Amino acid sequence: VFNSQYFVELHCEKRVCVFGTGDMGRSLGLRLLQAGYSVMFGSRRPQSCNFLPNGAQVLSHAEAAQAAHLIFIAVQREHYDFLVPLAYHLKGKVLVDLSNNLKKNQYPEANAEYLQSLVPEAEVVKGFNTLSAWALQNGPSDANRQVYICGDRAEAKQVVLAVATKLGFSALDRGSLSASRELEDFPLQLFPLWRLPMRIAVGLTAFFFFYLLIREILYAYITQGKDISFRIMVSLANRVCPIVSLIMLALCYLPGVLASFLQLYRGTKYRRFPDWLDRWMLCRKQLGLLALGFACLHVLYTLIIPIRYYVRFWATERTVTQIRQNGTNEFITSRAWHSDSYLSFGILGFGLYVLLGITSLPSVSNALSWREFSFVQSKLGHLTLLLCTIHTYLYGGKRFLSASLYNWYTPPGYMLCLVLPSVVLLLKLLLVTPCVDRNITRIRQGWEKGADQRNSKNNKTLVL
């Protein structure tokens, strides 16, 4: 039976074994050697093993199992049968299961639990399965790599936690071996928090792309016979990107506003939000980062406008026409003010946009206090939404009243994208008014509607 003596022996001898000579096994063995451990590989064919790290021994499974007290199982579940004849040699040893599956719920029980049933007298620990062979070779220097560990025996987990720390990884104990299925599902998850934001981004992009394609490109071709399809590549894209960016930024702050009004209506903070609102609030960071990505594309498309063939041709043609007609254009100060204001609000909004994205990085957010992070993401975030909305309003200018822009009686895309941000800003304005803000603050500090009346009734009951 496993006891603390093995823990001492492991730290004195630093001798470990790896079952499996594939990419994962070789990478783990190399990392263990670099950390100062004596590494032995267990193989079915010790004489034919190639490309193993220099300094590692290659033994048969039985010989390796006898020589080490800590054994890493870097083989797939389908090949666990070879461990059954070794059950006697594995008695009291710590077995670290590194396996993963191809899909969720592939087997009725977790791989680590199945391994424990095959060798019941060994101490099975699930761990290192969330790392790739590449991460093991390069170590945690390129990113913050966490190692999740679970097992039924505390001493066995301490052994594995010590090895993970020695290798330079951040180890985290996730509880008993029953949590191993959750750990095995981690590598199978593909951007779980990004799915809803990505669907929203793709849906909005597709909708506004075809909407603008119909009302601008097709409208000009059908009604005027003009072929301006070349505008699809830059002009149309440069209109879709800011529209989607502004809407997604509004969607990033809309759930917080709805949650505040819901708390006001309920008069308490001790009731859960609806599931759809919970999921929406959990993906606000992803919504904001995607919005920043579309804003960056808008900036890049805008920067290349002067070098476009169409723009250069149009500017040259207009200049030549003025020279032939001996005409000039009068400088209009109001237009200069409008143009500079439009550009200035856009630059300021994009600058705050970038600041929001930077503070979303874990390395930056971890260096901020909760109040600082809340100030940047909430107050500066709403300011960013305000500046970008004003930027869009200034872009429209007097064109909101121009009937010629309503092709086929449809409004321009930038008018549609202003609806949601304007609603969010108006609702936020209501929330920051003193009377409403005071009630919100009381509720978030623990006050409940009707609590004073209940307390007074209880006091009268006690008096009687």
Image (cartoon, rainbow, N blue to C red):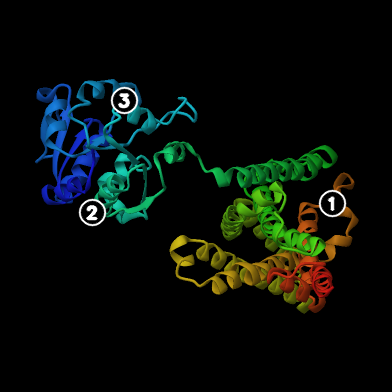
The reply to whether callout 2 and callout 3 are in contact (CB within 8 Å) is no
Return the disc, 1 or 3, that comes first in the chain's sequence: 3
Report whether 166 appears left or right of 300. Answer: left
Q: Looking at numbered disc 3 in the image, what kind of residue is underneath it?
A: Leu
Disc number lying in front (2 or 3): 3
Q: Quadrant of residue 333?
A: bottom right
Report whether 226 appears left or right of 236. Answer: right
Return the disc, 2 or 3, that comes first in the chain's sequence: 3
Q: Nearer the viewer, residue 47 or 3?
A: 3
Q: Hey, which residue is sitting farthest front in the picture?
A: 464
Please provide percent x and percent y for residue 113: 38, 31
Residue ID for mark 3: 118
Please provide percent x and percent y for residue 124: 31, 37
Q: How many discs appear?
A: 3
Residue ID for mark 1: 411
Gap between marks 1 and 3, in whole Å?
68 Å
Gap between marks 2 and 3, in whole Å?
29 Å
Q: Nearer the viewer, residue 72 or 53?
A: 72
Please provide percent x and percent y for residue 425: 76, 66
Return the disc, 1 or 2, that comes first in the chain's sequence: 2
Q: Is residue 44 above or below residue 375?
A: above
Q: How many neighbours does mark 1 have within 10 angstroms: few (below 14), some (14-19), or many (20 or more)?
A: some
Q: Nearer the viewer, residue 120 or 262?
A: 120
Per the image, label 1 sits on a secondary structure element best described as: loop
Residue ID for mark 2: 166
